Amino acid sequence: MDGGFTGDASHGSDSGPPLTPAAATIRVHYPAGAHKIGVRGPTAPLAADKTTPLTAGANDTWELALGVIAQIVEYKPMLDEMPAKGPNYVVKPGQTVDIYPYFKSTKGEVVMKWENYKSKVLPSTRNIRVYTPPSYKENTVARYPVLYVHDGQTTFKASGSPNQIIDGCLEADIAMDQGVDSGKIAEAIVVGVDNGSGVTDLTGQQRSAELTPTANAQLPSSGKGPQYAQMMVDEIKPMIDKEYRTRTARESTITLGSSLGGLTAAYLAFSRGDVFGVYGSQSGSYWWDNQVIVGQGKAAIAGANKPLRVYIDYGKNEVNDPDYTNQLVVPTDAMVKVLRDGGYVDNQTLVFNVAPVPAAGSGHNSRTWGPRLPTALPFLIGPGR
């Protein structure tokens, strides 16, 4: 390995208004031990073929004052002569940037963290799986936002749940690894929370019970959404925050789901916006109980803890059934209208994605929701560069 600057991004020519020259500082957080941290870059004051050393400080922090710069400067952190993984970082005039690179890892890891977890407020048991990003074990000073995904049985390719045979898989672990490697998605911990339906519950009764915020006479067991929310807020999130290096604030606590899981993600953000500050819904069941969630959303976005960002999608001709498509589309469009009327701005605080029919065909299942994650995750979690 020659350890040279990789030149794998090009931010220096970004269009936009002229930049005002100002001093800039790079701070790298990494437990280097006996090794040294430096940076390389293609333009002055850095060099592409020579490492500029950073000064070691307290708490595994390494710092370089660049002086006054007049343009965006690309750089690659170096561990001795080993370049950091992923695309180049950038710093603009006037910025002090704090970064948490990694040099050795290549992908994240999925583990079964809690098997057959028994909640205090719900009768069913569930597995809880956790994805940690590539840098997690290597860069032990880094802390991460957390994405909570419902229907954990079909969240991770690496989990191998029997449910994936029928429903497919989001492959969120693969989407995260690819997005982190390209710099399109910031590193994050992803928690897959199983619904309460085990493999013997073929009709998904426990899932329908837990992932609905209100009771509906057509499904007598429904309406346990408040208990599910209590489990998420009072049990699962505290366990994750205790066991992992998380960022605990609402802006770093994200929830995502599909179908009834999308309904639940919206319900968590609307009812417990003090905890879940960002939510995403894929083909969400906004139709539930005469669109009750739409009214809850309207009330929530008028309050102090309204969602900071919202991602919503459904598939074009998702199901070859006009009645079902109308049932999905009309309530979702109503939710989007409430958000826009409430001040959400497209591609800033709201992304509404009507996904084209995939090459593999349409469907209301994880096989079609998974390919939409590269659109959803950079917006929900944020970009990595």
Image (cartoon, rainbow, N blue to C red):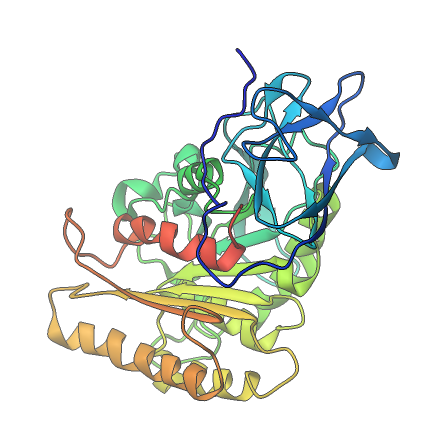
Q: Is residue 210 visible?
A: no
Report the side of 30 relative to 112 (left or right).
right
User: Depth check: 19 or 335 in front?
Assistant: 19
| Total numbered badges shown on the rendered structure | 0
Residue pictured at 64% horizontal, 54% vertical: 236
Specify the farthest residue to the top: 1
Q: Is residue 13 visible?
A: yes
User: Depth check: 327 or 345 in front?
Assistant: 345
Report the side of 197 relative to 306 (left or right).
left
x%, y% of residue 257? 43, 60
x%, y% of residue 251? 63, 63
Residue pictured at 42% horizontal, 48% vertical: 198
> In the rendered image of this protein, does residue 341 appear above or below residue 232?
below
Report the side of 49 relative to 250 (left or right).
left
Report the side of 172 relative to 121 (left or right).
left
> In the rendered image of this protein, does residue 160 appear above or below residue 302?
above
Residue pictured at 37% horizontal, 51% vertical: 373
Toward which corner of the image does residue 163 lie, by quadrant?
top left
> In the rendered image of this protein, does residue 50 appear above or below residue 201?
above
x%, y% of residue 349? 49, 71
x%, y% of residue 125? 54, 50
User: Depth check: 363 or 230 in front?
Assistant: 363
